[in-house]
Image: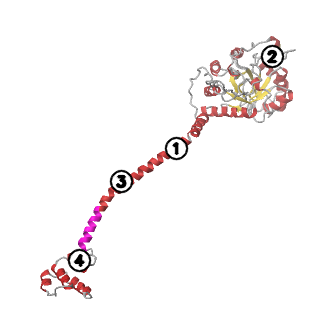
Amino acid sequence: MAALPIRLKALASRKDKPAKAAKTTKRKKGGDDDAFEALLAGADEDASADVLAARLGVPKRAGRAGASTAAVDGKRGDQDDKPRRRLNLFAVAVALTVLAVAGTVAWLAATAEETAAARRKASTLADIIVTLPQGGPRPVDAPRAAAPAEGVVKPATDAAPHDPDPMDVTVKLAPSRNDDLLEKTRAGYLPRMPAKGPAPWQAYSRPFPQDDKRPRIALVMADLGWSPSALEKVLARMPAAVTLAFAAGAPNLQKAVDQARGDGHEVLLQVPMEPQRFPQNDPGPGTLLTSLPDEKNVDRLETAMASATGYVGLTNLTGTKFLASHDSLQTVLRQVQRRGLIYVDSWPTTASQATRIATQLGLPRAVSDVQVDRAPSDAGVAAQLAELERLAKLNGVAVGYAQPYPVTLEGIARWAVGLRDRGIVLAPVTAVVNRQADR
């Protein structure tokens, strides 16, 4: 056995020689020589190696044929494994997709309420769709909540103590002309304080329950009187609690005032006041000017007030310069107070001294908080109305000015429908006088 490795090496060196030469070599029979004889009898080295391994009792070595067979088997195994790997990958992808979908559904379900609330808010403040035809009738109030079940006690609240709501009550106002409240002057008939009884602003006002504790919003629709068709649209679309302001120089003014009051609206008279950059920016004839003596401004004021009867007070048309002039403005507001009227400042400038002077004179007054159509678009109007609500809830009252643009009328009509449900009441301007701080 010791000579076995040497003989194996000799066998390896002779592997390419013909088989006949190998057969002529004489070897001893038996033992290891038999193994070598078997090796020499075979022409294939790998087969001889197998015989040798069997005779010697050692493990077989993989030869070229074995390696080739293993390689073929390996390739076949790889080919058989590829479909399995593809199937496994597909199963994993499907499982991950199912998990992702399930997770998304669970997240949407958990946040559905918040998402819906955010979308409702966004659609209200950023993208309001016009759903009502221009000039159509004002929509009815939203349906009221169902009555509580029998045996359930509904808690008392001051949110809406009046039924129907004051903004929807059909009210027949006093006639536009009351001789007891008029004084004949050179300019014409002017309001005057009676010896006893209510002042003109109270006699011509729209009734409003003073025990209503809800936040109040007063809206003033300004710049009316120049277009009969515009007035018709305002009367068709606006709640009767909206106050209407007519330009003092408008034609057929008394007819327009009577028409508005006949529909239940309070009326203000707009008096032109000097703006900045006058006369390039000229609001029209009869403008009150800081350059005029007080007597001239009083004459112009009386001419304006004599153009109609039945209004509760005055408001300004422009006036960014005049409202900032203390002396000129004080003279005018003193006349307003003497005539038993109110003054409503549209507040076109932060320099306006109207509220402070009115407080000193004891003149009932209100002041605008918001220009509703500063941005005349659906979203702009909705945003300003939302700001009015915020101010009303914060301060108890809020006042907004608006122009009779179609987009404004549509926006206000939609907005007013849900006020009751939001705990706010739309009030005439006389219901909010002296409820705002001086500015």
Amino acid under disc 4: Ala
Secondary structure found at label 3: helix
Amino acid under disc 3: Leu
Quarter that holds the C terminus: top right
- Which SS does the magenta portion mostly show? helix
Expressed as whole percent of the image width and height from the top left, the position of residue 204 reads 77, 17
Horizontal side of residue 44 vs 330, given as left or right:
left
Residues tagged 3 and 1 counted as in contact (Cβ below 8 A): no
Q: Earlier in the sequence, mark 1 or mark 2?
A: 1
Quarter that holds the N terminus: bottom left
Q: 10 Å neighbourhood of mark 2: few (<14), some, or many (≥20)?
A: many
> Within the magenta stretch, is there residue 365?
no
Q: Which residues are magenta?
A: 63-76
Q: Earlier in the sequence, mark 1 or mark 4?
A: 4
Circle nearer the viewer, 2 or 4: 4
Residue sitting farthest toward the top: 179
Amino acid under disc 1: Ala
The residue pinned by badge 3 equals 87
Q: Residue at x 52, y 44 (%)?
A: 106
The residue pinned by badge 4 equals 54
